[in-house]
Image (cartoon, rainbow, N blue to C red):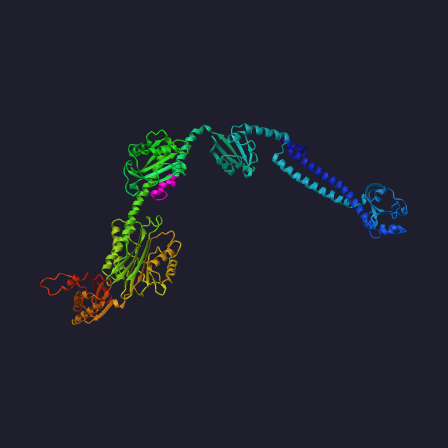
Amino acid sequence: MAQRNGRRSVLGMRTVAGQVFLLQVAIVLLLVATCIVALVLQSHADSEREAVSRSLAVAETFANSPGMDAALKSAAPAVILQPRAEAVRQDADVDFLVVFGTDGTRYSHPVPGLIGKKFTGDIQSVLRGETITKKLDSGIGPLVQVAVPVRDRDSTVIGAVSAGVTLERVSGAANDQFPLIFGAAGVVLLLTTAGAALVSKRLRRQTRGLGPEEMTRMYEHHDAVLHAVREGVLIVGEEGRLLLANDEARRLLDLPATVEGRRVAEVGMEQQTAELLESGRVASDEIHRVGDRLLVVNQRPTDQNGGPPGSVATFRDTTELQALSGRADIAQGRLKLLYDAGEEIGTKLDVVRTCQELVEFAVDRFADYATVDLVEAVLRGEEPMKSGAGADMRRIAADGHGLDTAHFQLDTVIRYLPSTRLGDGLNRGEAVLEPVLDTFNGWEQQAPERARALVDAGFHSMIAVPLRARGAILGVAIFWRAERPEAYDEEDRSVAEELVARAAVSVDNARRYSREHTMAVTLQRSLLPRGLPEQDALDVAFRYRPAQAGLGGLGGVGGDWFDIIPLPGARVALVVGDVVGHGLHAAATMGRLRTAVHNFSTLDLPPDELLWHLDELVTRIDQDEAEGGVEAGVTGATCLYAIYDPASGRCTMARAGHLQPVVLRPDGTAEIADVPGGPPLGLGGLPFETLELELERNSSLVLYTDGLVEDRDRDIDVGLDLLCDTLRGHPDRTPEEICEAVLDAMLPEPQRDDIALLVGRTKVFESSEVADWEVPSDPSAVAEVRAAVALKLDEWGLEDEAFTTELILSELVTNAIRYATGPIRVRLIRERTLICEVSDRSSTSPHLRQATITDEGGRGLFLVAQFADRWGTRYTPGGKVIWTEQPLPPDD
């Protein structure tokens, strides 16, 4: 090699690069010479065509020029035509322009001495009216001669015109371009030679200065080694194109005969192998399945150390591992099947949906038809039996891609007989495999006619697997094959058992969830009002919307509550509360708070005092649960308590951390009531304040929980504005219509929190239904009150109630005069009952007691309790009110 390098300057043409350079230069020279010759020949041809065109145009133009007829017929034609012909000849740049008569006498010629002599040549054709074109060699060189006839008005030939031009004259312009052509050819030759030199230099670098023989020998060695190795070799270039494939690679990958230059994706490789080759990533001993072969693949890039871009991959046949790989594939397939089952079965805590997912999954992967039957007790959420045979089962899921079968229909109740193989398998909790059905070896005893119909329809194999969880049988799943020709075997039974075992756990979880959910919902529903109490103070409507299952805790069980509580004196209390959180604990806490509100309301406490007592109760509950080790307390409970008096139209309300209510006035305006804010229940130590409003008749009071106006995608202020906008401008809506309008406009989607909505439209008693007297602190005034009351009762048509009412008022007024301080007021209200109220400024409350025989007093309240249906005391900021209720006659 050193010797060759030393002689390269002299014998450089031995290399491939030198030979290519000479070949390129020779080709360029040949192309340039060919182009020049073609240009010269083209120039001569163009010159001849130009001579003919010019001569013909000059001759015809002169022959048809005006006055030609008269000149030829004149006495001296030469005198007229010679100057005109010479002028035209010079202007047209032709060598001669000759006019001659019918006898051949010339009338014009560039050489004046030839005028009057005969025209040489064949003039007979011209005189017959033909145009003659000839190429002649004359004394002035090669020329082109054209002769055309001259006609008179009668189209008679009266002469002829001959024009001619030498080829040298018309080719002069083309000859002037030859220097430019040869110069351009020289430049092209230089540029192409320089390009060839650059290409040759790069080729010399690529071929490392080798000669043709050396390269041929090296290629033969490379090709022999490449195709002799027992490993497949593939070289992939840019854009995923195959550059080389040896014989072993073609055999292992089943490649077509011609693959070089084609894209990897176009030659029919396995997807996994094609993706590896196209990616060009580094691979070490990867196992790929190609047909029935297992190939170990290694791949490395070729662009390391400045090499060309691409990759080289080798393939080694390891078919001897096929048996082991087959078992691995089976195991992997089973694992994949069970993994997918875990992903697709049991997505929801619903028993029926879980069974439907089981049959759908099985039909896609394992069977042609599948059914699931569940024990009736499981569908009711009850605990299943240890054995499934003899129990009533209901078919709740079946699927078979539209197969028309004789299977039991959905919702059919089935009792599997213990005497059959399937019944025996249910007793023992074992799967039953029937690889061949048409032998009728006992599986058909459950329903012989249906069994024969199934076999006739093509069903040939079956596996029945009990759904078993925690030692109890929940039901049975049956898998059938009709379109798949393979019969079930022991391996399939093992797969079916594992598949059903996973599904059984999901079914049992759904059953237990359904039971707990039903219990929780039942508990919550029992703690909420089931209807509206009888009262005449408000027209009331309410809505309760639990949170959606899966979004708001345990399937919509939460801590929101509401209440409508009738109070003495025809008043009504409206309550809305919220225990933060969801689930049984929130529902139970809500029930305790609702019961506490009911109990405190019987004391007829003002709203602020009632909330104070409720706050104390929540604090004690938190302390008790903390001492008992319960982590979750009641922190986060809120409440709004409002009392409406229809006799006066006043509404008093207080709130503990709850949202303010909205008041819809009869004129259509809607505003948020500015109830002073109080802390949530359970914080303790902070007072609550009240707000008293005068509500006109047909005003609407809207109470709600935060789930109505607050959402993840909506700020609470936006929700409050939307609520007011929904209410505003519609004072004529009934409470029911208000509830529907508010929910339609504001119900979040999805609903993540409970919603309680309570709407009350106010009533105000007519003055004719209420009587009011002020009584002085004088015992003699009792008789006057009794008389006034008697008159009022006569007016109301309640004469039969006069004696009882006078007795009750006498005792109550007498006690007020004796033990209290004035002023004393008496009020009668005719509502559903007859209500008597006696108010004074004393805060002491009378107590009912059993008087002895020797006692002079103490029997007044006893008599009141005997004659009145109900009685009690409520405290006011200025004293107290003692009230009684008496039933009215049915016709009133």
Q: Using the image, determine if residue 562 lies above or below residue 177.
A: below
- For the N terminus, the image quarter is top right
Write down the quadrant of residue 143 in the picture.
top right
In the rendered image, is residue 656 in sight? no
In the picture, residue 739 is in which quadrant?
Answer: bottom left
For image coordinates 56% across by 32% down, the residue present is 258
Comparing 536 with 217, the one in front is 536
Asked whether, in this view, residue 266 is left or right of residue 322, the answer is right
Q: Is residue 382 left or right of residue 321?
A: left
Residue 56, above or below 678: above
Furthest toward the front, the residue is 154
Q: Which stretch is magenta?
A: 342-360
- Does the stretch in magenta take in 48? no
- Of residues 342 and 738, the one nearer the viewer is 738
Q: Report the predominant secondary structure element of the magenta stretch.
A: helix
Q: Is residue 675 left or right of residue 872?
A: right
Relative vertical location of residue 527 with respect to residue 32 in this rendering, above or below: below
Q: Is residue 315 above or below residue 85?
A: above
Image coords of residue 39 (percent x, y): 74, 41
Q: Position of residue 601 (x, y in %)?
A: 24, 59
Q: Quadrant of the C terminus?
A: bottom left
Q: Residue 333's spot in the image, x, y percent?
A: 41, 35
**Residue at position x 36%, y 43% from top?**
353
- Exactly how many numbered labels are in the figure? 0
Whether residue 596 appears in this view of the structure is yes
